[in-house]
Amino acid sequence: MSRITPSPVPADGPPRLRTLRRRLLSAVIGLALVGFAAGVQTLQAAPARAGTNQVDSAVIGWDGDKDAAIAHRDGSFDIRAGKNTTAGFGIYNNPASLQWSNAEGYYPALVTRFQRDNTTVTITNFGDKVTAGGNDYVAVYSRVTVDNHDTVAHTEDPAPSSGLIPLNDVGNTVQPGESVSHDYVIAVDRFGASYPWPSDSSLAAAGSYDSHYAHMTNHWDGRLGEIAQLDLPDPRLVNAYKAGMIYGEIVKDGTALHVGENGYDQVWNHDLVGMLVNRFTQGDLSDAKTQLTEFDPSNSPVDYDDGHWTFPWPWAVYLEKTGDTAFVQSNFNRIQTEAHRIQTDRTGPGGVMKATYDIDSDGYWTVDNAEALMGLTAYHYIAAKLGKTSEANWAQRTHKSLLSAVNTALTKTIDANHLDYIPCAVNAPNDGNACGQKNNANWAALFLFGRWNWDGYLFGAQQSGPMTTMLDSTYKNGFAKLSGLPPHTYGGYTGFSTGYNAGYGEAGLASADYRAEGVYDYQFMITNSQSAPFSWWEGIPTAGSTNWSPGTHATAGTGSSPHMWGQANASKVLLDSLVAEKSDGQVIVGRGLPTEWLRSGATTSATNVPIAGGHRMGATITSTGSAVKLTLNGDTPAGGVSFQVPGFVGNIASATAGTVNSAAGTVTLPAGTTSTTVTLTKPPAFQSSGGLDLDGYCKSVGNTGGVSLDGTTASDWHCVAPDGNHVSMSMDDACTYGYPYAASVFSRAADADDPHSWACWHF
């Protein structure tokens, strides 16, 4: 039996196809838009010119390399660095279905798996640093494995491209029930140097595939150990978070952060602000001084004003996390210059910020004013910490004056036009600009790029006016106006979605009703719009079915993939949803926790999270459904902890420690308290999404035999692999497969003794 109960198509229907353009940039400078072809590249066993603009684009390489290889789902990869060729394997035969993933969930080793001639073919490619003749290179190691699950022998030639150096000779004939692996290596990067490429013999002598795989995984696990660690009910988010950090290290050149490899192989000033803040928030401070010192907001392909206005923000986060007043003091003049530019640029009507092109056309944009307010908030924090009282007072006065001007302008526009949302422009409703276009995500620009609603709050900004009071109604209004799009996407420019999709949920952390939106938006991206494993284009005009399963994927893309500013935003909103520190030393835990993660048996954990003064802490949330326990570990935050899960609002019966405010949904723990258990007045009530299509799910992940019930209990369902083996399955993943637009959908069996009692659930 393949289907437990009928699994209907979601009421929203399949995703509609849209188009998209880059926020802020595409209309300003003439960069080529890449990736509009949705077809699969078919490789021949011969050199080909590197084609870096395919939709299915990932990166493989090494920490700080110059030109990472661009990988594709057919097991090929494009080599630049002067070689300008594509390496791949002719054994790929454009199958109807394939699986493409990161090895072990998150490593930058891209794995392509498909069926051919009653065998399973697996192509794996990863980069490792190799030293030959005293010079450093990045080499890509490839393994083509053929598993013969037929009853007769098969001859399967990997047909490697010229230039791929064989590391073993195992022959092409594979006996029934046997597996053979062909290993190869090729140099792909010289870290920007011009010394000669290594000889074939030196590369072959540099070690085996297995030894380099071990070196690669050890290196990246070490780097990941420097940042906050997550353990979540949705392990896909954990893998996306890890992969995002690794991709950022591969995309950067040396210590210089870049946005992408294929399209945006450089960095823009406002991109860099957000990328640095995410690194410091996660705890990646290894190159922080160099990166801050070298950050010149005027040295940008386009000199965006908001890159100057928000310049103090990464400095404030660095100062908060490290307590390094000496370094910030030595750079204070630079920070002061950029902060005072805000006052100079207040040339808009009534003293708001000047007109910019930030919403793809000229206007007095609300998001610009929020960014300026964020810059002033961060500057006030820095000046106060350094004892520069006059500058701190200036920042406070200027913030108050600018906020008053913005509130006056917004209130006038809102009242005159009877708006129930925060307009994109302070002086006009959205129907008069790009935000009024069908499925144009700029309606949500304030929520991410403004920063002030959430990050300003964390740094103690005095907040009032429509940007504070109308957050919820603006989310509600904007989502309602989207046409033909499923929940938890914001549209594009115009289009299906963007690489910023999760980031747009950040302001929801400061709202009442959309606090888990960032997590939901990130899950949407993973299920519906990846262009490669845990990679997304900045712009996603269209998405739909491809031969890569499961899920739907981008079928067109603009910008770069992966796009590291978008990934940084997603990582930051995910971490902030779990643990976020205020500048007064108090740590907020669980602010954006989805209610689905309060189901019985669920555990959510964030450890090694950086907090003020170079300290690290952790928080673990476990739930029985009716009681939610918080356990703290590591260093003690100076300002204590505020435990404020959305499901707590108006729903706290008692807590074993801390001060309870049930109406606000908070339990405040003084410094030194290490645990509390919150008993809920009413456990969360979940709704059934429907049954599970287990046969379809098994086949979508490459188990061509479908599903098998191998016993009489709910735990006796298995997928049947191509070789006939019965393997375990994830019922939660099966729910995501069946209900891709249901946020945080999860599985539950009503009766452990009834295999047909499984259903999918959501809040």
Image: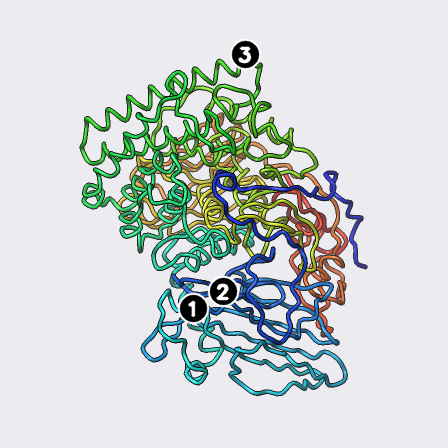
Instruction: From the image, tell me which residue sits under label 2.
Output: 69
Separation (CA) of disc 1 from disc 3: 59 Å
Separation (CA) of disc 3 from disc 2: 54 Å
Separation (CA) of disc 2 from disc 1: 8 Å
Q: Is residue 185 visible?
A: yes
Instruction: Give me the residue at 28% from left, 52% from top.
Output: 290
24 or 381, nearer to the observer: 24
Give the structural element (helix, strand or loop) at label 3. Answer: helix
Instruction: From the image, tell me which residue sits under label 3.
Output: 416
Residue 407 versus residue 713 in the image, above or below: above
Instruction: From the image, tell me which residue sits under label 1.
Output: 189
578 or 326, nearer to the observer: 326
The amino acid sitting under disc 3 is Ala
Nearer-N-terminus badge (1/3): 1
The amino acid sitting under disc 1 is Asp
x, y (%) of residue 661?
A: 45, 27
Nearer-N-terminus badge (3/2): 2
Q: Quadrant of residue 212?
A: bottom left
Assess whether mark 1 and mark 2 are in contact (beta carbons under 8 angstroms): yes
x, y (%) of residue 190?
A: 39, 69
Which mark lies nearer to you, 3 or 2?
2
x, y (%) of residue 321?
A: 30, 45
Residue 378 versus residue 550 in the image, above or below: above
The amino acid sitting under disc 2 is Ala
Outermost residue, top side: 416
Instruction: Give me the residue at 42% from left, 64% from top.
Output: 220
424 vs 695, left or right, is left
